């Protein structure tokens, strides 16, 4: 049985996990429970928000916080930690000025509408994901260019246009890697929007690209890929940009979920670049698990919600979050019939959840297991505290919970170095413990989540992050 806190205590503890970490560290982790597997050799890169205020002035949304990398390097049973802020233009200028200079998704410049009117420059906080590809380390944010960093020193090199591949296009924070090919997209404009897609080889060079005009506005945060298709889920949003342009409201406050409209699913051929659009009842989903082709159908696993949470204020006030509302974010399977054009949805897991992932070798292929964050309690809306291995074949699951006052982050799957098996590997997750205000990295055996293989305790806390990635290189030439 998993013990859970009261809703009020849960809200306080969850909000505490979004406390700024202004310091940068570099040290070998020596406070370890258990044993680090000998075949775990490489680097876990994590990215997420690090600063939630500038000179004491709070930002309006966690999406706008300056990006901070948290890096765990494994070598011969030892683990080295380092965190570093991405030195973006916005970070450097605001630290120098000691005040908020930029608007964001949910942040306004101090000074009311006069300080914001017709100010459309939004800060690129480089805070959403990090990936190593083509011998480049990128800190990614979905509405701008990636920032390139030195993987050994974590020094910020600067914005990267991918050797001229990007002009004004954004480069999203949710790429997919399938059969050795890196695929990403970007969305530009407000309404209509331009959707651009790129495929890169293992050296980071363009294989092909395409672009499409998409009616209306949406939050295309993630996508899916199979051997023959790109799949985008376009949620029904209405955007009224005028209050934002006039400085009255944040961009977030100008977006409204239109549950009377339909969700449109864009199916784009990777072969001839033709796009087909299927429609279904309105739902919202930020993160997707996997997609595969079967008998002229596309099956996909995604996190679905009936609506999008709308905030009236441009203040975070995380400790006032209600965890007694209906569940937000559940795992569903969506089937797209390419013959009949029918879309069917089936609930798989009626528990609040997020950050679904699979073994990287099974991206775009039919898979059995999903690894995801879930709420410790099965009912009501709740933060994702635990890690689940979900079996799509029989509906069974395994759950590891770090405790009633702790919060596990996105599980990153690391394959073992021998044969490929869907659960033949490790799950790495950064856990925040509100009772000690410290964090640790947990290492789980993906075949058996009963007990951790190791807990690697940090000397401090890390704010709850977003996404990360694993590479078999450890880049320890400088750190060691």
Image (tube, rainbow, N blue to C red):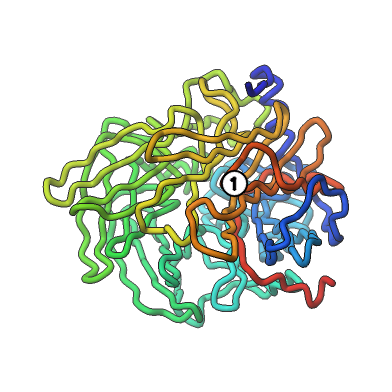
Foreground residue, 364 or 13? 364
Neighbourhood count class around disc 1 (C-alpha, 10 Å): few under 14, some 14–19, many 20 upward? many
Residue 240 position within the rendered picture, expressed as x and y whole percent measured from the top left: 38, 42
Residue 122 seen: yes
Above or below 381: residue 102 = below
The residue lying furthest to the front in this view is 419
Name the side, left or right, on which 209 lies relative to 280. Answer: right
* For residue 204, above or below residue 256: below
Q: Is residue 123 above or below residue 153?
A: above
Q: Is residue 128 visible?
A: no
Q: Residue at x 77, y 73 (%)?
A: 476
Quadrant position of residue 206: bottom left
Q: Number of marks in the image?
A: 1
Query: In the rendered image, which quarter is residue 95 located in?
Result: bottom right
In this rendering, position of residue 272 left or right of residue 165: left
- How far across and how far down the image is residue 18, in percent? 71, 40
Q: Quadrant of residue 302?
A: top left
* Residue under the point 15% across and 46% down: 341
Q: Quadrant of the C terminus?
A: bottom right
Q: What quarter of the picture does the N terminus occupy?
A: top right
- Residue 186, x across and y down, in percent: 42, 62
The residue lying at 74 percent from left, 42 percent from top is 57
The residue beneath circle 1 is 410
Where is residue 305 shown, x and y percent of the image?
41, 33
Q: Report helix, strand or loop for mark 1.
A: loop
């Amino acid at each position: 049985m998993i013990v859970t806190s009261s809703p009020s205590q849960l809200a306080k503890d969850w909000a505490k996990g979004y406390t700024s970490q202004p310091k940068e560290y570099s040290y070998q982790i020596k406070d370890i429970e258990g044993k680090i597997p000998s075949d775990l050799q490489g680097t876990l890169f994590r990215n997420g928000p690090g600063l939630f205020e500038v000179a004491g002035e709070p930002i309006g949304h966690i999406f706008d916080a300056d990006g901070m990398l948290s890096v765990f390097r494994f070598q011969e049973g030892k683990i080295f930690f380092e965190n570093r802020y991405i030195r973006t233009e916005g970070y450097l200028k605001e630290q120098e000025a000691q005040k908020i200079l930029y608007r964001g998704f949910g942040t306004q410049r101090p000074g009311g509408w006069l300080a914001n009117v017709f100010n459309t420059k939004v800060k690129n906080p480089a805070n959403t994901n990090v990936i190593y590809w083509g011998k480049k380390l990128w800190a990614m944010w979905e509405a701008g260019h990636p920032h390139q960093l030195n993987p050994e020193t974590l020094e910020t090199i600067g914005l990267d246009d991918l050797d001229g591949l990007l002009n004004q296009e954004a480069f999203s924070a949710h790429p997919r890697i399938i059969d050795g090919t890196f695929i990403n997209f970007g969305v530009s404009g407000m309404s209509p929007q331009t959707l651009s897609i790129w495929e890169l080889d293992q050296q980071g060079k363009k294989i092909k690209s395409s672009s499409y005009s998409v009616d209306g506005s949406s939050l295309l945060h993630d996508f899916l890929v199979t051997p023959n298709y790109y799949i985008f889920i376009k949620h029904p949003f209405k955007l009224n940009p005028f209050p934002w342009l006039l400085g009255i409201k944040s961009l977030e406050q100008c977006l409204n979920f239109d549950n009377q409209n339909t969700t449109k699913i864009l199916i784009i051929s990777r072969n001839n670049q033709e796009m087909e659009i299927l429609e279904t009842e309105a739902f919202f989903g930020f993160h997707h698990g996997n997609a595969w082709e079967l008998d002229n159908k596309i099956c996909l696993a995604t996190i679905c919600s009936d609506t999008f949470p709308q905030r009236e204020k441009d203040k975070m006030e995380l400790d006032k979050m209600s965890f007694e509302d209906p569940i937000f974010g559940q795992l569903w399977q969506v089937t797209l019939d390419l013959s009949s054009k029918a879309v069917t949805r089936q609930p798989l897991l009626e528990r609040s959840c997020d950050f679904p992932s699979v073994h990287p070798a099974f991206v775009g292929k039919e898979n059995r297991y999903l690894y995801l964050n879930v709420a410790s309690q099965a009912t009501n809306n709740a933060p994702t505290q635990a890690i689940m291995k979900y079996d799509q074949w029989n509906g069974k699951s395994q759950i590891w919970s770090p405790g009633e006052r702790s919060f596990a982050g996105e599980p990153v799957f690391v394959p073992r170095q021998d044969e490929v098996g869907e659960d033949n590997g490790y799950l790495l997750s950064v856990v925040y413990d509100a009772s000690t205000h410290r964090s640790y990295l947990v290492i789980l055996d993906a075949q058996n989540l009963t007990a951790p293989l190791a807990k690697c305790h940090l000397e401090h806390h890390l704010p709850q992050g977003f996404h990360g990635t694993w590479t078999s290189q450890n880049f320890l030439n400088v750190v060691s």
